[in-house]
Image: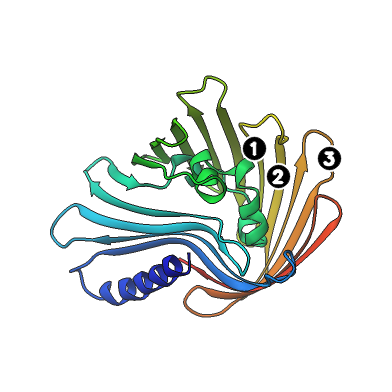
Amino acid sequence: MMRTWCLACAVAIAGHAASADDSWPFNAEGRATIGLTNRIPGAAPFLAGDVLFSLGVSGTPLSFELGAYGYLNRTDTPHETYGALAWTFPVAKVSAGVVKPAYDSFALSALDRILPTLGAERARQTRSEATWGAMFDGYLPLGARVESRIGPVDLAVSAHRDKSRKATLVAVGAAWTQGAWTVSGAVEGDVDDDTGTQAKLAAEWRGDRLSAGAAVFVPDSTTLPDLLELSGTYAAAPRIELSGAVQIPLDGAAATVAASGRYQMNSGIGVNIGAGVEDGHDAVVSTYLDWRF
């Protein structure tokens, strides 16, 4: 995992340098984080993120993709690493390899940006089974992905196969943006298991200084509850952003509440302080630097 993050950072730096000319078209999306948290005793320092880098080949529609989701600390390294070859057609982009699941591109949990390690721990309820399986159950999901944009709608379809678990995961996701509103959702199913289907749906409104959102997560699990998540962000000053979220289990269990403050520096880098109460009883405090692409 450390090698993955070092390589990802090197790609980002090299990509920004390469973007000074058109020889190697570079694109980066997501967020990388380094900080401290009291959530796991003895494992205070952490690296976390949800990043995807793309480096194009001059004069061709070919590009290489590298990315990761998850975190690293002194005691554990739950993560998924992406590595794929992509070909961009006039109407769509097709990727093959260890691709990012379509399920993970839409209706994202606000906890991922407020308290990154806590957000990653909820992957079983908010992320693709391919992602959760790579993080916690030894999956090696190989597959393909097709993505496109049609007017105000972003679309993605992906398929992953993990031979060791005999699982074939197919996901479809979409996001519609109109004015200040974005509605997004995704569905994922295991074609080898008729009962293995999960879904999520989110709506977000973005104003000049205030944004608010709501999401519902329905995991493929008989032991984990469905979740209702409410979130909001307020630009208190030109460089200061305040965020909050509450995750409410729909089985009546205690809610998780989180809040953070972010001071924006240059080049997308910010200083954050976050705090929360996990499942109604465990206090979580984090301070971290993040780099938004």
Q: Are marks 1 and 2 in contact (CB under 8 Å)?
A: yes
- Report whether residue 74 is seen: yes
What separation in Å lies between label 1 and label 2 (alpha carbons)?
8 Å
Q: Amino acid at mark 2?
A: Glu
Q: The residue tagged with tag 2: helix, strand or loop? A: strand
Q: Which residue is mark 1?
A: 217
Question: Could you say which quadrant of the image residue 145 lies in?
Answer: top left
Is 187 placed above or below 71 here? Answer: above
Q: Residues within 10 Å of mark 1 (few under 14, many from 20)?
A: many
What separation in Å lies between label 1 and label 3 (alpha carbons)?
15 Å
> What residue appears at the point 42 percent right and 65 percent down from the top-left corner?
4
Is 121 left, or right, of 257 in this rendering?
left
- Report whether residue 238 is seen: no
Is 223 placed above or below 246 here? Answer: above
Of the two numbered discs 1 and 2 in the rendering, the one whose residue sits closer to the viewer: 1
Q: The residue tagged with tag 3: helix, strand or loop? A: loop
Precedes in sequence: disc 2 or disc 3: 2
Q: Which residue is mark 2?
A: 229
> What residue appears at the point 36 percent right and 76 percent down from the top-left corner?
13
**In front of the other: 224 or 133:** 133
Is 10 placed above or below 151 here? Answer: below
> What residue appears at the point 61 percent right and 54 percent down from the top-left corner?
120
Is 103 placed above or below 43 here? Answer: above
Q: Which residue is mark 3?
A: 253
Q: Amino acid at mark 3?
A: Ala
Precedes in sequence: disc 1 or disc 3: 1
The image position of residue 117, as x and y in percent, is 64, 60
Of the two numbered discs 1 and 3 in the rendering, the one whose residue sits closer to the viewer: 3
Q: Residues within 10 Å of mark 2 (few under 14, many from 20)?
A: many
Q: The residue tagged with tag 1: helix, strand or loop? A: strand
